[in-house]
Structure formats: C-alpha cells, structure tokens
Image (cartoon, helix red, strand yellow):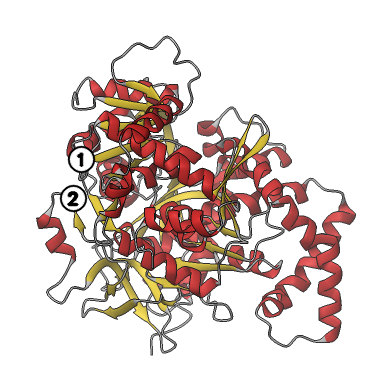
Amino acid sequence: MANTFPHLLLSHATQRPTAPALREKEFGIWQTWTWADVARDVRHLACGLAALGLARGQNLAFVSDNRPNVYMGFAAVQSLGAVPIPLYQDAVAQEMAFVMEDADIHFAFAEDQEQVDKLLEVRETVPSITHIIYDDPRGLRKYEEPGLISTAELKKLGAAWDKDHPGVWDSMQQRVQAEDVAVILYTSGTTGKPKGVCLTHTNFIGSAQGGVEVDKLGPSDNVISYLPPAWVGDHLFSYAQWLVAGFTINCPESAATVSIDMREVGPTYYFAPPRVFEGMLTSVSIRMEDAAPFKQWLFKKAMDVAKRVGSDILDGKPVGALDKLKYRLGDFMIYGPLRNAMGLSRIRVAYTAGAAIGPELFQFFRSIGINLKQLYGQTETCAYVCLQRDGQVDINSVGQAAPGIELKIAENGEVLLKGVSVLKEYYKRPDATAEVLDENGYFKTGDAGVIGANGQLRIIDRAKDVGKMASGAMFAPNYIENKLKFFSHIKEAVCFGNGKDKVCAFVNIDYEAVGNWAERQGIPYGGYVDLASKPQVLALIADCIRQVNAGLAAEEGMADTQVARFLVLHKELDPDDDELTRTRKVRRNFIAEKYAVLIEALYSGKTEQFIETQVKFEDGRTGSVSATLQILEGQVFAATRQAA
C-alpha cells in the first residue's frame, strides 16, 4: 500500500489515469488535469528542481494562493526527499525573512510579480535564496535578477533532465519513507516567534485516512481549495485527503471570485472557518432586510419550520408528516435557492473549525439541509484530533476522538492526546518539542477542556488564558469573546479580567454589517472611525453585551464574568499591525501592552479616553488613527442559576 504522498499520486495515475484530479479557473474557463497529467507535471517539476540542485533534506518555500502548481509542487518537492514550507501569501517581507532564515531556504516558489518582489526584498537580508520559481509571468518579462525561472521553463528543464538521467527520479522517489518529514508548517506565533512544525507522511496520510473513513469520501467528491496553503486545514483537506481519497480539487480564479466559482463547481465536501459561514449568513440577512415585505414574511415562516425540524430531518430522526410536508415546500421555495446562492447545493459534508461557532449560526446551516459539523485540531496535530460523526452532532462540543487518536484530560484541565497526527518535532527546536510532549508521548494541546460521558470533547479556552477573577470565579476570556462574536455586528472582541474585580472588553464592529444597519436607520457616517463612534452604534453594541451578560448570569459559575464596562475600538484589529495572527487569532499580550492606556481607563472609572494609534497600510506606508473613545457600562444581571 502506498504510504507517502508521491507514491499515492503514482498509484492514482496508474489506476485512474484519465479521471479528473485537479481543476483551475483561468480567464473564465475551467482547465482540467487528469491524474496522468498531474503525475507527468510533478515528475517534470521535480526533475527541474533536481537540475537546479534541490537535494534530499533541503527545504523549499511556497508563497502563493491556491494554484495547481502549488499542490503539484508539494508532491514534486516531496518526491526528491526535500520538504515544502508554505507561507502565508499576505505576509509582509519582514515576516517571511524570519522563516527563510530559520529554515535555511535556498529555493522559493512565488505565485506572481507581487510575491517575487517580496522575495527579492527578502533576499537582500537573506542572501541564501538563490532560486525563485514563479508561476504567473505577467509583469516579469523584463526582470533580470539572477535565479528567476518560470514554472513553464522549469518543466521544460525537468523533461530534458529526466531524458538525460533515465531512472534517477524513479530511484529518488522510491527512497522517500513514510516517517520522512512531508511538510513544515510554521505556527501563527501568538506568544512569540513562529515555530516550524515537522509533520511526516504518516502523520498526514493517517489523519486523512481517518477523515475519509468517517465521512466516506471518494473519487466522486469535489472540493474547492481557497484557504491559505500555509494553513494546516488546507493541507489536510486540499492535499492529504485529495491524495488519499482521489477526489477532485478545484482552484478558484481569485479570492474575489470564490463565491461565484463555488456555484459553478458545486463542491460536495467543504471546509470553512466560522467567519466564512458568518459572512454567508450576514449576506443573506442583508438581502432579506432589503426584500419586499411578502418575501420577508415567507422567509420567516419557512425558517420557523426549518429551526423546528430541519436538524432532525438531516439526522434522520422521526418528524411528523405535516412538518415534513412544510419542510419540503420550504426546501423548494427557500432552502434550496439559498443553498444554491451560497454554492452549497451539492454539499454532502461540511466542516468548520479554528474558532467557536455561534449556536444560531450552526443551527441555521444545519436547518436548511447542510450537513455542517465541527472538528478540532492544531497545526501540531494535522488539524486532526476530534470529528463529529453523522447523527452525533452537538453544538456544545467538537466531537469525539478521531480514528487513531487517544484523548485524556490532565489534572489542570488541559487536553492531552497521542496518536497518528502528533508532530514529529519542532524544526531545530528540541527544547520546544520537549515542552509539548510529556514523558508518555502525550501532546499538550494548551487548551482546557472537558470530556463528556458520551466521549464528546468540549473546549473551554486556551489553558494559559484561563485565570481567576478577584472573587475566585474562573475567567475564560475566549469563551466570553466567542459569545460576543456570535452577533453579526461584532467582528472581534478582547476581554480582560484576570485578577480583577470585573470584566472589561474591547469590541470591533463588523463594518459591513453595521454599515448596512446604519444606512437602513438613516444614519450618515464617513468611514470606520466615524461609524464606530456613533451613539446609535454604541447602543447597538451595548444591547449585544446585555444579551451575552444575561446568558452568562444563567450559567454555572459564570455570573461574575459578565462584561461590566466596554469600549468600541476606533480601528479594526489587524494582522499587519501585529494585533492578530495571520489566522486571525488575538495576540492578547501584545494588545494589552499596546492599548494599556485604554485598559487603565476602563478600570479607573473614566467615561472617555483619547488615543492615537500607529497603523500600517497595505502598500507598506505607516500612518496614525486617533479618536476619543466613549467608555460605557454593560448591563449586569444577578446570577439566575447557582452552582450545585
């Protein structure tokens, strides 16, 4: 049985040479590669890299959106016994430089002129980068910098090299072993410099096989590959499971056309973080608010039926004949057209992960017939720890241990696991590796959680972020923040309260959702800063906080963690300003230091505070944004449920 990615690829090419393996939309037309085409291009790319000097054990960096030559490039690099390292394509040159130096990069793949320019800038401080392969030649015709070569030229070079060195590539790919490092994925670096996570062929293939088994994936499935290739989830869903299950992956024309391309492709298997599903629902809500009264009435009636019985019908549970009939009518008039408009009409299995998803959001998609489930994992575990099986979906949990995974909870509440997906090591960091693997080989996830009687895991918060209020109550900031972000008007939230007598919060509004709301209310505004400071918007956010506080007051042990004071930030938290990671995780300590004056104002009883903040623009320029922020009181409730 094939046990490495190059071997899996050759197996598909031998058994199903004419089946579609990979598609890309270019200039409005879908181009298709069969498995035989992919195997040929991988061989030529690999031989071209060998001709340039890429050798076993070396690393090659990829900086690109989802392109066929990226996925084929991964397999080509691996077939030489070398290691691909995908980087986030929106990272600035300075961020890339750290990884390039840390991983001793000599070869890099760039999607287009923009990424080539960044790599040439990086090369000024990291001169070890000798070869840059680019995929899109537009704008690069007159570039004469040394070491530049297009993928088309590389394939021609590889075909000639292969002809002159018969059998050499076959011998190199046969040397690749299951326990070799298949990819190095750098962590988002929420607490310091990113670390390179070394994951083997066994890690990812075992994880992919578990998912394929649970969800019965196969060659007839279709996936749209649109999430950053540097993110572990894309490597699992768009690469590992592709080569294990043999389905077709589809690369969109651009990030801006994903929704259109989804409607054309009709994926059967889909993954998105909660923010993507939130965006879909927000778009639906905005359209319905602008619809005619009769359409609004029809939509509301149909959704009432869906909320009542939709999930039960999806799970195959018994439902009354009249409700079944109403649901079928609703499916014909509302749910079916909705799924089609979102590109989800053919979805058989959909997953979300990366952050908590709101109960109403989760139920909305399941109620209209989309089999949306949750999974749980980290970069260090191939995004594969827990999966929700069909018929066992629970909004309050992330599922049961996936096949090949053993879970347990440490005495301090931290989730520990061992199994097929656990990393081999951190790249050149034995100290960091020793910190996350205990003496029995269990990986320390850093998350605090609870395993229920049914084996379902519930994540509470990051273990390092869980603290105590001055009253002794547990303070889990991420738990509260997620409740706030469940509201469509709130894009981001950061809560403070460890060691304090009350919880205070920063809130980012969702500019699109709140802007649309303001326009319907007849409220004029002149940009983000102006909109975020409007009294009506502050009242809107205050109502969201009131609802969250009412819920916390009803939960065991959570009444003391209601949001007592808050402010709406004058700018969006941004990865370019180091406030969020590239995967949009909050850099909590950095934010606490950067906005210390606002935290002090929240806890000192002030009603307003002036602040001026440095920001980075997309073109690399810097500037500043200033405002006088209003500090408001949150409505706090008496505990309505006492701990047993």
Mark 1 lies on residue: 103
Residue at screen point 60% across, 62% down: 361
Instruction: Look at the numbered discs 1 and 2 and tell me whether their residues touch, using CB distance below 8 Å.
Output: yes
Left or right, 341 with respect to 144, comes to right
Distance (Cα) linking label 1 and label 2: 8 Å
Where residue 5 appears, x then y in whole percent?
Answer: 38, 55
Q: In the picture, residue 42 is in which quadrant?
A: top left
Q: Secondary structure at mark 1?
A: loop
Q: Is residue 80 above or below residue 329?
A: above
Q: Which residue is mark 2?
A: 427
Q: Amino acid at mark 1?
A: Ala
Extreme-left residue of the structure: 431
Q: Residue 628 appears at what percent x and percent y?
A: 42, 33
What's under tag 2, amino acid-wise?
A: Tyr
**Secondary structure of residue under mark 2:** loop
* Residue nearest the viewer, comparing 585 with 60: 60
Label placed on residue 428 = none
